[in-house]
Amino acid sequence: MAGNRSWVFFLTVCAVSLLGSNADIKFSIPVGKLFTYELMRETFQNDFEPLSKLYAGRLYDDPMIFKCNLQNFPDLPEWLRFTQRHPYDNGFLYGTPTSPGKSIIEIYAINKRSYETARQTIIINAITEKILPYQAEFFIKLREIEKVLPSPVQDEIKQDLQKLWRTEALEVVNISNALDRGGRVPLPLAGHYEGVYVKVASEQYFSECLLKVLTPEHERQCKAGAKIKIPGGCNFCSIPSNCITWCKTELIDLSKQEPAPPAPTMGPGILEAGGDFNPPESPPSRDFLPDYIVTVIVPLILAIILCLLLAYIMFGRREGVEKRNARTNQIQLYHHHTIHGNSDELRSMAGGRGVPPPLSTLPMFNARTGERAPPLQSDSPSIPLIMAQHDPYSDTLPRWESPSLLHL
Ligand SMILES: *[C@@H]1O[C@H](CO)[C@@H](O)[C@H](O)[C@H]1NC(C)=O
């Protein structure tokens, strides 16, 4: 029974996931016309929240971000761009395909509240269509790309341009953010916008109003930086934010374009037979000996000389230094020793008073023989030191107590 139930569950999961992956959205669009697809947060919110929960009265409005890419590729195709201003706004995929072909776009929605993800696939099939010969690009200063991409706004702008062009047969070819074309990020203040370029195309030739853009007078005025108002009832903007900047209007006439140069003809891919290979003459040989002497031998000799000099300084003159050091050491040792002996004597004196006066108070005394030397000029304690300096090996030294020192 339990096995059966889990099978049913498994099948349901399979069916749901199959349905999910089958829910691809397909578009068939002409090459050279603008494609826009709005990623509705509402739709994805339904994926995150089961319907039962929605009906129970819990409606969420979660922040969401989207990741879009061409299937099996890390990024979107070159012609397609994605934009979303804020996690609480809808996202947009937009762009103009330049060549026919099929693109499968994967869209991942990430819920920034629960960190759940939902996936959607759209299939865009671009079909070749005749390119409209007359194109014009307009700059709309008071707009942002996300505000222009929704189709009602696109229609508003198109209607104004249709009046300007005096034709109904007008197609939006491209809409792009001014920031993508070297525009500046505006100040974060009300009334400052990034600006949007809108390119439209038609079968019909430009209207008189549009052709005024090409007059030298218009060019001159634009260079002078004056605020241009095209006269003669050519201002057809019903909504102020949709008004175009006349000086940035550009007309493109593709009908006059020269045909592309013919593609280079392909050869058979085999070189013609042309005799034997004649190798180029080798350059004259060069004598490298002087270079070798200058760069290797001379520095080597210098290094050897320096080495010898250093060796002489280090070993030839070191002996004297060592001898002097040895003498100083002996003096220090002897000094230490006398201090030691004196303190011992003082200690024994403190032990028993009334004993004969300590040896150190006597003028001179040989510790080994017990013989007393005749008194010297003075009995200051510095005398033995001075004597040691004169002749440290003398047997007549006063109070030598350590024989090992004697034979140093
Ligand atoms: C549309 O505009 C963008 C940005 O300027 C540009 O990169 C792209 O090539 C244009 N597409 C067409 C088909 O003109």
Image (tube, grey):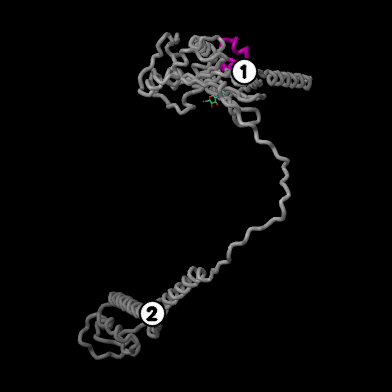
Is residue 114 in sight in this rendering?
no
Q: In this view, does 121 lie above or below 307?
A: above
Residue at the location (31% across, 87% down)? 391
Residue at the location (45% across, 10% down)? 236
- Name the main secondary structure of what is drawn in magenta: helix
Given residues 303 and 174, the one toward you in this image is: 174
Residue under label 1 = 47
State yes or no: residue 170 in magenta: no
In which quadrant is the C terminus drawn?
bottom left
Q: What kind of residue is marked 2?
A: Arg
Report ligand 1 position as a quadrant: top right
Which stretch appears magenta? 38-57
Is residue 313 in sight in this rendering?
yes
Residue 171 pos. (x, y %): 56, 15
- Helix, strand or loop under label 2: loop
- Helix, strand or loop under label 1: helix
Residue under label 2 = 317
Measured in 3D between alpha carbons, the distance from the residue under mark 2 to the one under mark 1, in whole angstroms, is: 93 Å
Q: Earlier in the sequence, mark 2 or mark 1?
A: 1
Instruction: Give the quarter of the image for residue 65.
Output: top right
Q: What kind of residue is marked 1?
A: Asp
